[in-house]
Amino acid sequence: MVNVLVTGQPRVGKTTMIARILAESNKSAIGFITKEIREKGYRIGFNIETLSGIVKPLASKKGKSSKYRVGSYNVYVENVDFVVDYLKAKIESKTIYDLIVLDEIGKMELYSNSFKEFVLYCLKQKNVLGTIMMRDNDFTAQIKSRSDTRIFNLTEENRITIQRNIMELMK
């Protein structure tokens, strides 16, 4: 298999697509999903949640202060590092996983050097399914240019086709 990464505008459905693909496939998977934290209809932060159910705050408008910020969000790099350490230990335990889910390779997560190393480690396995930020920096541009990685640009109009294409690639 090749690595598959989905990019697109915020709120276009990248995480939802990853969750649907996981639900419809019979593949064993390890990794994480980034989920919004909403309060009274407003987004106030994000959690990083492993597929095995560990939940850690990734960023918050209301939480403790952090030297790492994206817009009005405080980013908790120590929680990214915790999840990376947990997932890497599970992968290195020699348990075989069909997919490594990385949702998302984005600004907040990229404050962590451990996360960047983990992403490159996972991509070498050639079984990543994930999302990646649309606007590139040096790191994400390098990932998008890899010959072992397919990038899909998700829009509202092409969701069904992209999901079908990704499911076909995973067979």
Image (cartoon, rainbow, N blue to C red):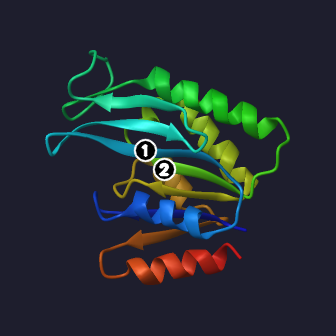
Q: Residue at x 46, y 48 (%)?
A: 104
- The answer to which of 96 and 69 lies nearer the viewer is 96
Number of other residues with Cα within 10 Å of mark 2, as a class: few under 14, some 14 to 19, many 20 or more: many
Task: Look at 18% across and 31% down and name the residue there.
Answer: 72
- Numbered circle sitting on residue 34: 1
**Real-space Cα distance between discs 2 and 1?**
6 Å
103, above or below 113, in the image:
below
- Residue type at the position of mark 2: Asp
Image x and y of residue 143, in percent: 55, 54
Q: Earlier in the sequence, mark 2 or mark 1?
A: 1
Q: Residue furthest right?
A: 94
Q: 19 or 110: nearer the eye?
A: 19
Residues at circles 2 and 1 in contact by the CB criterion of under 8 Å: yes
Q: Check residue 57 in the rendering and tell me which mark sits there, or answer none.
A: none
Q: Where, quadrant-wise, is the C terminus in this rendering?
A: bottom right
Give the structural element (helix, strand or loop) at label 1: strand
Q: How many neighbours does mark 1 have within 10 angstroms: few (below 14), some (14-19), or many (20 or more)? A: many
| Label 2 secondary element | strand
Q: Quadrant of the N terminus?
A: bottom right
Residue 24 position within the rendered picture, expressed as x and y whole percent measured from the top left: 58, 70
Asked if residue 3 is positioned above or below residue 153 in the image, the reply reads above
Task: Residue 23: name its quadrant.
Answer: bottom right
- Left or right of 88: which side holds 50? left
- Tell me where residue 20 appears, x and y as whole percent: 49, 66
* Tag shown at residue 103: 2
- Residue at 63%, 80% in the rendered image: 168
* Three-letter code, disc 1: Thr
- Image coordinates of residue 134 in percent, x first then y, are 36, 58
